[in-house]
Image (spheres, helix red, strand yellow):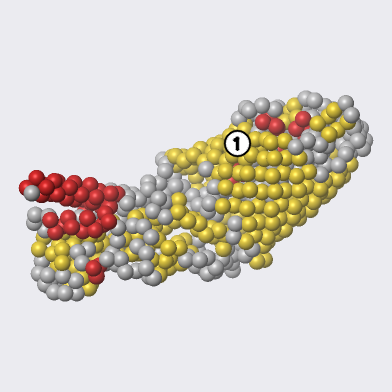
């Protein structure tokens, strides 16, 4: 957390942050566009560095859910604020074995059905890849963010961050297939008055998951 | 003061340039590996029956047995490397998947030579409800209902049933198979595998000459297996240039609570070619999950093995029923085995009948580690055995690490 606080000072010290005139509780909206100018769905726009206490971690008791439906994690990308407890209910009639070896969070929920698995606390910021030890092709990402100010883009690539208190912010855009480093998407804004609209540009790599084995010879 | 302030500014600048990099790096998505490596290491403390195991050319029916001394057979406790399996996989262009597995099993191979257990290319089309796949390379048939663990190890116990042990001991082939799967609107799922391959021209020889055994060794195309007469037989032995044909049909419900399985194999062995065994077999099985924590498996095999210039024609039968209960990381399994070999030509008798009960307790943690204890009560009778068979009972304590 100390590093985040230091980082939060950086935009303040920055020479010329983009200034906007926004009122308290203002909205920052916009689009995330690909190289073809089309909107990118399932991108996450988030506040990386808050500037006041209201944007600091307050979600110690926050909960979120990632279901397993028809041998698929739903949603496939789940953004949460650090400190959130995530439940993994298995809506299928078959058993799943949910796990992650990611550095951000390592956990496993051995074979279960229904809602029997205990919630998992995500207490560190970063990307967590989640899989099923039984069904090799099942995968999802939990994006653990430092502040509760984040939004996922819709099918047109649109997003809306609401309720931002006045102050300077560093915003960034993330996508699971983005070839851009997140730091290269960084935009600094000063929320002081009216609403603001900004655009992010990402280059996506084609999705190439490991070929699955769905037949008799499943990956063991 | 100006110097102190300069230092403070320097620290601040460094903080602004370094700390954000650390903060941003955590959003990198771990790349999907195009090549992956997996390994399984299985170390055991074992105490089998008094007779030396079949792996030492003895009459013992389990993988680990005792020693032969001047005073007779003697039970011994050993610390052994039971298995080192290495799997390498790769995602090739065109979504073709390549997979290779080698196994080191010093007791069965008689040295540390790696055996090539499988090496194949596979391509699939479609998705979970409907699709089909093609696979070509070195493999075994998918008839075992127990070898569903890492590196094709038994999932429910340390040792597989006599039926499934034999399938993985003696059946290797190089060929191709196609698979089609389909989920119907009324909630059923069909899965049909059709395959053909070369290599198992002596399939049946081991079980006819040795009888059934209980273990977890897996063979390889470059491997050879010990026989009671002190010699060894190649597991991959193509002599007549006729392919073995097989099919594996599964009918199950979409919720995977119950599945019926039927397997047929005929190696089409040419009896006019020296050393060729003509073996055909049928396997029926069921897998039931009546409760999320309960697995029940039953499988029955019936087959015949013929070799015309030697009096070892045999009828093969084996059956087992396995009940396994699991809760989180713990699993308890109990299995009953019944097996027999009937002599068909009245020559050198291959007759055997026996049964076994296996109980196993397994605990896994952190996905990579497992400790398991297993006890096998085994009673078999081979009238033509060179030596009387003492008690076959034995236990194993296994630690397994999965990378």
User: Looking at this view, is B191 or B374 the one in front?
Assistant: B374
Place of residue B332 in the rendered image (x, y in percent of width and height, measured from the top left): 69, 56
User: Looking at this view, is B393 or B242 the one in front?
Assistant: B393
At x 11%, y 47%, the residue is B4
At x 72%, y 31%, the residue is B225
Residue under label 1 = B84
Residue B117 lies left or right of residue B205; in this view the side is: left
Residue A154 lies left or right of residue B100; in this view the side is: left
Disc 1 is placed on an element classified as strand
Place of residue B14 in the rendered image (x, y in percent of width and height, measured from the top left): 18, 46
In the rendered view, would you say A150 is above or below B400?
Answer: below
Instruction: Mark 1: give few (<14), some (14-19) or many (20+) Cα within 10 Å.
Output: many
**Residue A123 visible within the image:** yes
Q: Residue furthest front?
A: B1
User: Looking at this view, is A69 or B364 the one in front?
Assistant: B364
At x 9%, y 54%, the residue is A15
**Residue B247 visible within the image:** no
What subunit carries mark 1?
A: B
Place of residue B290 in the rendered image (x, y in percent of width and height, measured from the top left): 67, 66
* Numbered-mark total: 1
Place of residue B78 in the rendered image (x, y in percent of width and height, measured from the top left): 72, 36
At x 16%, y 74%, the residue is A24
The quadrant holding residue B239 is: top right
């Amino acid at each position: 957390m100390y590093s985040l606080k230091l980082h939060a000072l950086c935009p303040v010290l920055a020479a010329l942050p983009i200034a906007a005139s926004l009122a308290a509780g203002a909205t920052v909206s916009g689009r995330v566009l690909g190289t073809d100018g089309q909107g990118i769905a399932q991108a996450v726009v988030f506040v990386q560095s808050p500037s006041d206490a209201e944007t600091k971690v307050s979600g110690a008791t926050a909960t979120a859910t990632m279901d397993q439906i028809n041998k698929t994690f739903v949603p496939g990308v789940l953004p949460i604020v650090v400190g959130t407890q995530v439940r993994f209910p298995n809506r299928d009639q078959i058993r799943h074995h949910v796990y992650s070896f990611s550095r951000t969070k390592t956990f496993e929920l051995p074979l279960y059905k229904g809602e029997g698995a205990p919630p998992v606390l995500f207490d560190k910021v970063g990307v967590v890849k989640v899989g099923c030890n039984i069904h090799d092709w099942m995968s999802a990402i939990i994006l653990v963010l430092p502040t509760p100010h984040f939004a996922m883009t819709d099918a047109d690539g649109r997003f809306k961050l609401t309720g931002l208190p006045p102050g300077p912010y560093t915003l960034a855009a993330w996508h699971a297939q983005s070839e851009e480093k997140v730091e290269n998407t960084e935009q600094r804004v000063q929320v002081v008055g009216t609403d603001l609209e900004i655009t992010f540009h990402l280059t996506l790599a084609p999705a190439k998951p490991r070929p699955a084995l769905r037949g008799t010879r499943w990956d063991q | 003061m100006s110097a102190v302030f300069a230092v403070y500014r320097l620290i601040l600048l460094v903080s602004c340039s370094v700390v954000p990099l650390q903060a941003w790096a955590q959003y990198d998505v771990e790349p999907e590996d195009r090549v992956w490596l997996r390994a399984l290491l299985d170390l055991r403390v074992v105490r089998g029956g008094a007779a030396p195991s079949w792996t030492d050319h003895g009459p013992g029916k389990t993988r680990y047995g005792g020693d032969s001394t001047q005073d007779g057979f003697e039970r011994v406790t050993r610390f052994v490397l039971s298995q080192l399996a290495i799997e390498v996989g790769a995602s090739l262009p065109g979504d073709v998947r390549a997979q290779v597995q080698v196994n080191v099993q010093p007791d069965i191979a008689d040295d540390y030579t790696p055996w090539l257990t499988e090496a194949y290319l596979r391509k699939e089309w479609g998705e979970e409800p409907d699709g089909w796949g093609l696979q070509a390379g070195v493999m075994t048939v998918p008839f075992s209902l127990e070898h569903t663990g890492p590196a094709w190890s038994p999932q429910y116990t340390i040792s597989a049933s006599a039926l499934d042990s034999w399938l993985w001991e003696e059946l290797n082939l190089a060929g191709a198979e196609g698979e089609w799967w389909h989920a119907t609107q009324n909630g059923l799922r069909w899965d049909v595998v059709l395959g053909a391959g070369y290599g198992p021209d002596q399939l049946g020889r081991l079980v006819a000459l040795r009888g059934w055994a209980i273990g977890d060794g897996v063979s390889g195309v470059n491997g050879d297996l010990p026989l009671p007469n002190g010699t060894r037989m190649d597991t991959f032995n193509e002599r007549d240039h006729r392919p073995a044909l097989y099919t594996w049909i599964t009918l199950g419900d979409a919720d995977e609570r119950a599945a019926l399985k039927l397997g047929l194999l005929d190696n089409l062995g040419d009896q006019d070619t020296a050393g060729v065994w003509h073996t055909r077999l049928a396997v029926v099985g069921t897998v039931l999950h009546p409760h999320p924590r309960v697995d029940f498996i039953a499988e029955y095999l019936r087959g015949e093995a013929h070799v015309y210039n030697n009096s070892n024609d045999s009828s093969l039968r084996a059956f087992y029923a396995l009940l396994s209960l699991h809760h989180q990381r713990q699993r308890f399994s109990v299995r009953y085995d019944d097996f027999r070999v009937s002599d068909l030509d009245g020559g050198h008798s291959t007759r055997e009948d026996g049964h076994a009960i296996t109980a196993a307790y397994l605990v896994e943690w952190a996905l990579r580690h497992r400790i398991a204890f297993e006890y096998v009560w085994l009673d078999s009778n081979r009238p033509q055995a060179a030596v009387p068979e003492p008690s076959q009972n034995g236990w194993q304590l296994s630690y397994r690490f999965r990378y």
